[in-house]
Image (spheres, rainbow, N blue to C red):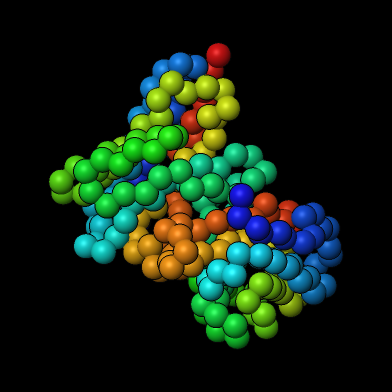
Amino acid sequence: DAGITQSPRHKVTETGTPVTLRCHQTENHRYMYWYRQDPGHGLRLIHYSYGVKDTDKGEVSDGYSVSRSKTEDFLLTLESATSSQTSVYFCAISDPVASVTQYFGPGTRLLVL
Amino acid sequence: LAKTTQPISMDSYEGQEVNITCSHNNIATNDYITWYQQFPSQGPRFIIQGYKTKVTNEVASLFIPADRKSSTLSLPRVSLSDTAVYYCLVGDRNNFNKFYFGSGTKLNVKP
């Protein structure tokens, strides 16, 4: 399995509080992604990064921000969590030079009360 | 985003061959077809990828007709552990930010 870890794995927080999720990779892959997955839905892209300090929005970016200060770390921040952001969050990595596919992390389950 | 259409769910029995078909009428010239498998509480896992004709690996086969408007994932002799959601994705494999996951096909393998 690709070396991808996510922290925390589970989190419960209250509406209005800031939350930061961390994705860490040991593969030195250039691209990193944050997805959310809700019941009955596939994965939807929130933000992605194509290099250090280079990020762009995905399909459902409202209410989220990201940062990538090192190749190995990609942070997802919910500035002020809302109940609609209760979801499972997956990080993924890819590098077209190294592989033809994405590799996904184990996920973070977030509950916003 | 190139969208795909798959059956919502399928049932099978252990030992049978399972074929899951995906429609992708708007596939572009540079697009590849990729299938992922996802178990509960885990991230998706790559199964197979192809561009045209047939691709086979140790896990599955992928059949793609000449017009590339559909594809079929074939799982030989499934077991209970193959119960999962299977996603068909279409896109340029250098631009995963353009991939659309959809709801996938829930495969339920019965004893």
Q: Residue at x 66, y 72 (%)?
A: A72
Residue A33 horizontal/vertical position (percent): 56, 67
Q: Residue at x 47, y 23 (%)?
A: B78
Residue B54 horizontal/vertical position (percent): 26, 40
**Residue A69, quarter of picture:** bottom right
* Number of numbered callouts drawn: 0
Position of A59 with respect to A7 (left or right) is: left
Front-most of A82 and A58? A58
Visible in this render: residue A27? yes
Residue A23 horizontal/vertical position (percent): 69, 66
Residue lying furthest left: B66
Front-most of B102 and B68? B68
Decide: is A83 above or below A106.
below
Visible in this render: residue A67? no
Q: Residue at x 51, y 64 (%)?
A: A94
Identify the image quadrant of the C terminus of chain A.
Answer: bottom right
